[in-house]
Image (tube, rainbow, N blue to C red):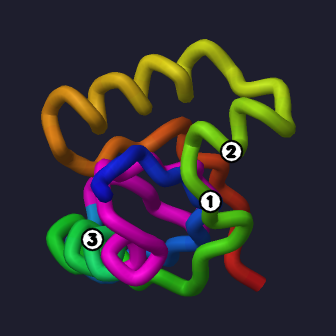
Amino acid sequence: MRRVWIGMTHVRPNSGCTIIDQNAYVQVLAFVNDADEFQQEMQTAAEHYSMTLMGIEDLEPFDDRLRTHSVAKELKQKAEEAKSNRSLRFGTFNTYPAE
């Protein structure tokens, strides 16, 4: 059953990336069937935007997150967009310099 999933993703910019110029963590929301499909969608998006997906943490259905955590209004809106557009949505990129 498709539903919105959320996960904290770690990405690194590749040559030609215009979204970020440093490594970053970003909450990502996607309307998918399961964790495997989320990872596939995120991998495809990372390649499209010239980023390398370094990892995904805290991946769970968005409804579960809402029951256990306080969730920012921005992410609730992104969840609605992901569901209505049936597409992946990025939250705010939190960048940091590579060591």
Left or right of residue 39: residue 25: right
Residue 23 lies, in percent from the top left, at 59, 69
The correct choice, above or below, for 82 with respect to 94 in the image is above
Category of crowding for the residue at label 3, using alpha-carbon neighbours closer than 10 angstroms: few (below 14), some (14–19), many (at least 20): some
Mark linked to residue 60: 1
Residue in the image at 51% along x and 73% along y: 11
Give, as a single range, the part of the protein colored magenta: 18-39
- Give the residue type that dot 2 points to: Asp
Front-lying residue, 9 or 33: 33
Q: What element carries label 1?
A: strand
Circle nearer the N terminus (1, 3)? 3
Q: Where is residue 91 in the image (x, y as percent from the top left)?
A: 50, 38
Task: Return the mark for residue 41.
Answer: 3
CA neighbours of label 2 inside 10 A, class few (<14), some (14 to 19), many (20+): few
* Numbered badge on residue 77: none
Viewer-closest of 14 and 79: 79
Which element type, helix, strand or loop, lies under badge 3?
helix
Q: In this view, does 70 lie to the left or right of 43?
A: right
Q: What residue type is labelled 3?
A: Glu
The residue at 55%/85% (across/down) is 54
Q: Could you tell me residue 66's position as x and y percent? A: 71, 31
Nearer to the camera, 69 or 25: 69
In front: mark 2 or mark 3? Answer: 2
- Label 1 sits on what residue type? Glu
Say few, some or many: other residues with alpha carbon within 10 Å of mark 1 (under 14 / 14 to 19 / 20 or more). Answer: some
Cα distance between the residues tagged 1 and 2: 7 Å
Which residue is denoted by mark 2 in the rendering? 64
Q: x, y percentage for residue 84? A: 19, 27
Disc 1 + disc 2, Cβ < 8 Å: yes
